[in-house]
Image: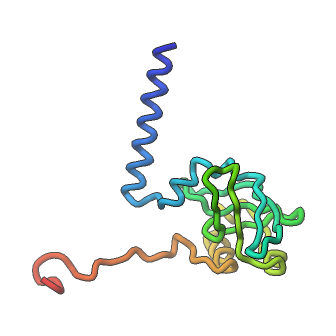
Amino acid sequence: MNKMLTVLSVVAVFGLALVANAYTMGSMHKNDMAMNYDVNRLIGTQVKNSDGEGLGSINDFVFDQGGRVIFAVLDHESRFVAIPYSALSISGAKAEEARVVLNVDREKLDAAPEFDRTKAMTDRKWAGDVYRYFGQQPYWTEVEPQPATVPGSGGVGY
């Protein structure tokens, strides 16, 4: 029993070190890291718009190969809609107290593209179109900030 607890402790510490390393290396964003632990507990949570109107409930999440949440799958009037995770405002100290808001009116959500798991995982154009439909910049198209000066001899500012 003690041997099993020791092994589990080592695995837990190793896993935490990997998450911390991924965070410091920039492959995980702060919000993603905070929510990865509780994101599955949000399944079934009601989603409302900024007017307090119920839009549906979270049915599932889609992750990329790096573990980043790409989409929340919203069950909206018996129809599944892919919602860019970045379009959701999530508040509450614990997942069971979470308040999830999608700043969109019902008509726009009614006309949103229906969720397609295959396209969500393999078709960057489709996924990008969904992001833009909800007013979001697809995270995979974001340009990394470049330094203002070029390091080394002869570089600007040196």
Which residue is at the far bottom? 156
Q: Residue at x 77, y 55 (%)?
A: 59
Q: Position of residue 53 (x, y in %)?
A: 82, 71
Which residue is at the far top? 1
Q: Residue at x 46, y 31 (%)?
A: 11
The quarter of the picture where the C terminus appears is bottom left
Above or below for 21 versus 106: above
Q: In the image, 66: left or right of 86?
A: left
Quadrant in the picture for residue 13: top left
Q: In the image, 52: left or right of 153?
A: right
Q: Residue at x 49, y 26 (%)?
A: 8
Residue 74 or residue 140, whichever sits in front: 74
Quadrant in the picture for residue 149: bottom left
Above or below for 94 versus 15: below
Above or below for 104 versus 81: below
Q: Position of residue 62 (x, y in %)?
A: 66, 57
Quadrant in the picture for residue 116: bottom right
Residue 101 or residue 128, whichever sits in front: 101
Q: Position of residue 73 (x, y in %)?
A: 74, 61
Q: Residue at x 79, y 69 (%)?
A: 114
Above or below for 103 versus 8: below
Residue 127 or residue 32, whichever sits in front: 32
